[in-house]
Image (cartoon, grey):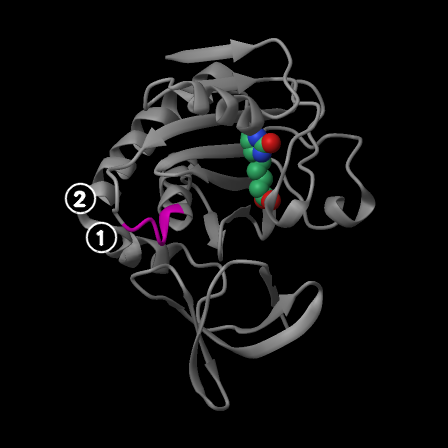
Amino acid sequence: MIEWLEECDSTNTCLLERARLGVPSGSVLATRKQTGGRGRRGRSWVSAPGDSLTFSLLWRFTEGMPLAGLSLAVGVAVADVIGEGVQLKWPNDILQKGRKVGGILIELIGMAAVIGIGLNLRLPDALPEEVRASAGALGSDLSHEAWLAQLLPVLMDTLKKFERDGFSGLRERWFSLNAHADAWVRILSEGAPLLEGYCRGVDAEGALLLETTTGIQRVLSGDVSLRLV
Ligand code: BTN
């Protein structure tokens, strides 16, 4: 079920291909050397060989079930495994001491979700300057295999819980991990300011609840990003 690849352009891309060919739910592809990692909003995910744990998990959901809030649910699972001082930045950045140590990219083919997770164990030398400014690393002595072995059972349990109760069952936990709880934040769309307000958590669909001067606005993740003002 878990396959370690010597090298791979993107574990998400490889697993998406395999998902189309019918590999079962629970299949995992992992690598220490990802050469063309992809992030949210068309960005790339840079990781030097050996510095990051990069893997993707395929999960086949029941036809028709709502998947809103899935990436937040996955964030909760990852945060619970890392423990110590970890926080989540909506929609799905994993922060430690205010720095981004991991990211989540979920891609769907119908009801099959390819859940890609990148975690910086050490900080790659090759990071672009603008990424380095906000990036961090877990600085852990645990091996890639040990991290994966800890993450997978928690992730799978969380996905089963999500299948049963949707995101609403994990919402309180997400609140407690929210890096920007009650802070004044700005929502950017394609780099341009879109909205500002107090971050009042998320609703049962995983939409950000922003208290603006004109009342509460729901922000859907799509192409937006959040900044602390
Ligand atoms: C983000 O923060 O923008 C999401 C980054 C997701 C990176 C992971 S690494 C494993 C998987 N394969 C990819 O190409 N991307 C995800």
* Residue at 52% over, 40% down: 105
According to the picture, the residue beneath numbered tag 1 turns out to be: 169
Q: Earlier in the sequence, mark 2 or mark 1?
A: 2
Q: Residue furthest bottom?
A: 214
Q: Up-down: is 187 above or below 174?
A: below
Tell me the CA gap for discs 2 and 1. 9 Å
* Tag shown at residue 164: 2
Residue 45 is left or right of residue 216, and the answer is: right
Q: Amino acid at mark 2?
A: Arg
Q: Amino acid at mark 1?
A: Gly
The secondary structure making up most of the magenta span is loop
Q: Which residues are magenta?
A: 66-70
* Residue at 36% over, 39% down: 77
* Residue at 40% over, 54% down: 177
Q: Residue furthest left?
A: 164
Residue 226 is left or right of residue 202, and the answer is: right
